[in-house]
């Protein structure tokens, strides 16, 4: 009789944990929100978020007006063709170094392995920004968020 009460208590506890986990899973709000883009780190944050949300028009608006800037269609096609693939990367935004109208945002890029028993690893990288018309704009981001063909002079044979 004593074992039955103990087993019942364990089963009730397990059931309560399952219900709690389900409630948390279904009520958890997505905390990824846009922030103010008046700072270099805000621009980087919003650009990354826009690319992950596949809001290519918004992401494109963060690109600097420099020579050989891709068209909005070329920008979108880089994502759709898999040349730029931000889905499996995490980004931690670090310190910002600003000199005049140029800024560098230090990033830690987290990549995950494809097998379930490996942990993720991080690489330091950076984003470069320029101030144009009072707004910070991206002139470079790491690979998973940037196509190396952007801002490059077209090949002339």
Image: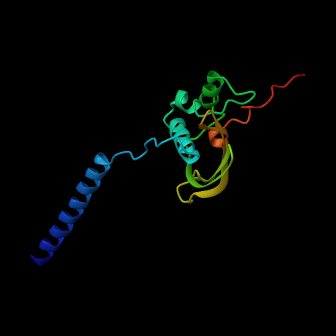
Q: Nearer the viewer, residue 65 or 113?
A: 65
Q: Nearer the viewer, residue 86 or 5?
A: 86
The residue drawn where x is 56% and y is 41% is 43
Q: Is residue 68 above or below residue 40?
A: above
Residue at the far right in the pictured view: 157
Quarter in which the C terminus is drawn: top right
Coloration of the structure image: rainbow
x, y percent for residue 93: 56, 53
Q: Is residue 35 above or below residue 116?
A: above
Task: Determine which quarter of the picture holds residue 151.
Answer: top right
The residue drawn where x is 58% and y is 41% is 86
Residue 88 falls left or right of residue 83? left
The residue drawn where x is 21% and y is 65% is 13
The residue drawn where x is 62% and y is 57% is 122
x, y percent for residue 39: 55, 45
Residue 1 falls left or right of residue 46? left
Residue at the far bottom in the pictured view: 2
Residue at the far left in the pictured view: 1
x, y percent for residue 121: 61, 58
x, y percent for residue 29: 34, 46
Residue 87 falls left or right of residue 101? left
Q: Is residue 19 above or below residue 11?
A: above
Q: Nearer the viewer, residue 17 or 140?
A: 140
Q: Is residue 137 above or below residue 114?
A: above
Quarter in which the N terminus is drawn: bottom left
């Amino acid at each position: 009789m004593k074992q039955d009460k103990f087993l019942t208590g364990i089963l009730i506890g397990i059931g309560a944990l399952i219900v709690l986990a389900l409630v948390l899973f279904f009520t958890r709000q997505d905390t990824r929100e846009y922030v103010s883009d008046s700072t270099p780190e805000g621009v980087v944050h919003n650009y990354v978020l826009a690319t992950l949300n596949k809001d290519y028009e918004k992401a494109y608006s963060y690109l600097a007006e420099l020579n050989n800037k891709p068209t909005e269609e070329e920008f979108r096609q880089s994502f759709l063709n898999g040349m730029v693939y931000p889905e499996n990367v995490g980004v931690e935004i670090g310190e910002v170094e600003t000199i005049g109208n140029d800024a560098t945002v230090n990033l830690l890029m987290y990549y995950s392995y494809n097998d379930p028993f490996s942990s993720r690893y991080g690489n330091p990288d950076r984003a470069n920004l320029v101030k144009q018309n009072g707004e910070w704009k991206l002139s470079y981001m790491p690979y998973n968020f940037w196509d190396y063909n952007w801002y490059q002079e077209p090949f002339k044979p």
